[in-house]
Amino acid sequence: MSGPAPTYGGAVVTARDLPEALALRAQFPEAVVLAGGTDLMVMMEAGQLRPGRVLNLWGCAGLRTISEDGGHFGALATWTDVARHPAVHPALRECARTVGALQIQNRGTVGGNIVNASPAGDSLPLWLALDAVFEVASLRGARRIAAADFWVGYRRTALAPDELLTGVTVAPAGADAVLYRKVGTRLAQAISKVVVGARIRQVEGTVTEARIALGSVGPVPLRARRVEALLVERGLDPDAADAVVDDIAPIDDVRSTAVWRRQVAQRVLRRWLVEQRAFSARNARQ
Amino acid sequence: MHIEFSVNGERREVDLPPMTRLLDALREHLDLTGAKEGCGEGECGACSVILDGEVVCSCLVPVVQVAGASVRTVEGLARAGELDSIQASFLKHGAAQCGICTPGFLVAARDLLDRNPHPTPDQARDALAGNLCRCTGYQAIVDAVVHAEAVRE
Ligand SMILES: Cc1cc2nc3c(=O)[nH]c(=O)nc-3n(C[C@H](O)[C@H](O)[C@H](O)COP(=O)(O)OP(=O)(O)OC[C@H]3O[C@@H](n4cnc5c(N)ncnc54)[C@H](O)[C@@H]3O)c2cc1C
Ligand code: FES
Ligand code: FES
C-alpha cells in the first residue's frame, strides 16, 4: 500500500468484439483474460498473479447484453445490468445485489464470477438450480456446457485454454419455486459462509423436479442429490432437508466451521420447504 | 502505453503501463489526490470515482480500461467555487471526522443522488454499503445524503 505504486507490468491486448477476442485468445493462450477485474485486480494487488500478458475483454459491448426475456446473459453483463433488468428472474436479480457492493456490481461480470470458479461464488448455485447452459467459444467453434458439468475441481472449469465464456442461458422457471439465500457476516462485501440456490417444480401438487445447490460447502458448488431425490419421492417434506448434511463437504476455515455450515444449510432448506408447503396448501384450497 | 480519457470534463493523457490502477494514474500522474487508498482491494470505497456514469473502485480498474472513458472524481463535484449539494450537506450534518473516507462517500452519494435525488435512509445505506467509515458511525453520513437536496433548496 505504501511505496511506489504497483504497475503489474505486462502487455495488454484489447478486443472490441467476439471475433477479435477469439483470434487474440488463440494467438495468446497463455494470456490472462480480464473482464471487470474485480477478482483479478485483487489477486494482482496481493502479488498472487503477475501475468505477462492480459487479454482485455471489457469493451466487447456485444457480449454485455441481456436478452429482452431475461433468459440470456452475455458473459460481460455486469451484476448491475442483471439487477436492473426487469425480466430477469427475481432470484437472480437478488443474487446480483448481493455480490460485493454497488462499486463491485458495476464492474463485476456474470462471466467473471462463473469462470473464477470460487467455491464461494454467489451465483454458482443459482446457475445450477436454474439448469443454466454456458456458451463457450474458440476459433475451433462454439459449444455448450451444462452448469452441472462446468466446475470440475477446486477453481477449475471445463474451459479449454483457447476458449472464452461468451454467454449463459437459463430455462424459463415459470411457476417454479426458486430460492436464493446467502448467509454471510453482513449484507454487503461478505464472502458467503453458505449460499443456496434451489428450484422446485410441481405439477398438480406433485414435485416433478427438484434442484438444490449449495456453495461454500465444498471445493466446487454442489448439488444436494439426496435432498432432491427425497423431494421427488415424498413431495414437499421439510424433513428432506436433513439429508443435506450428507450431500455437502464443508470444511472449517476463517469464516466458519464445517459443523455450523451443515446446520445452516439444513435450516435454510427446512425453512424454505416449510414455507413452500404452506404456500402450496393455500393454493390447493383456493 | 498512451491513454486518453476525460477527467471532470477535461481531456487528460497519461503514458503508463496499461495495468496501472486508475487510482494511481489519478493520484500519482494527474495530481488528483482526492480519491484515497484505504485497502487496495475493493472493500472500503475510499477510492470511489464515477466512471461513465457508474461508481467504481478506482483501485480495481486498470487504466487501459478507461481509454476514451469519462471519469468524475471528488475534485469535479464543486463547480465554479461552489460546493455540490452533497458536500454542503456533509458540512451541515457534520458527516466527516478524520476525513479519509469522505471523498469516497461523496462520490458514491453523488452517484446515488443522480439516480435518486430523494433517497430513503435505507436506500442511502444500501447505496453506500461499499464505503467504510471508522469514525462517524454512519448516521451523520446517512442524514447528509437523505437531506442533500433540502440543502440545495
Ligand atoms: C470487495 C469485493 C467483494 C466481492 N464480493 C463478492 C460476493 O459477494 N460474491 C461473489 O460471488 N463474488 C464477490 N466478489 C468477486 C467478484 O466481484 C465476482 O466474482 C465478479 O463477478 C467477477 O467478475 P469480473 O468481471 O470482475 O472478473 P475478472 O476479475 O475480470 O475475472 C475473473 C476470472 O474469470 C476469468 N474470466 C472473466 N471473464 C471471462 C470470460 N468471458 N471467458 C473466460 N474467462 C473469463 C478471468 O480470467 C479470471 O480468472 C467480490 C470482489 C471484491 C473485490
Ligand atoms: S482502496 Fe479501493 S476500495 Fe479500498
Ligand atoms: S471520517 Fe474517519 S473514516 Fe470516515
Image: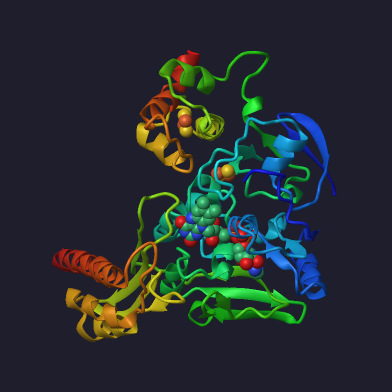
Residue pictured at 57% horizontal, 48% vertical: A106
Q: Nearer the viewer, residue B63 or A36?
A: B63
Residue A222 quadrant: bottom left
Residue A258 in picture, x, y percent from top left: 32, 72
Q: Nearer the viewer, residue A173 or A138?
A: A138
Residue B98 visible at all: yes
Q: Identify the image's colour scheme: rainbow, by chain, secondary structure or one colour.
A: rainbow
Image height of B69 relative to A141, above or below? above
Q: x and y percent of residue B55 in the render?
A: 58, 40
Q: Is residue A88 above or below residue A139?
A: above
Q: Quadrant of ligand 1?
A: bottom right
Q: Nearer the viewer, residue A275 or A269?
A: A269
Left or right, residue A31 beside residue B121: right
Q: Residue at x 45, y 77 (%)?
A: A219
Name the foreground residue: A5 vs A63.
A5
Picture residue at 55% right of the left edge, 45% below the top: B39
Q: Does residue B135 appear to the left or right of B6 in the view shown?
A: left
Q: Quadrant of residue A225?
A: bottom left
Residue that lies at the very extreme toward the left in this rendered image? A285
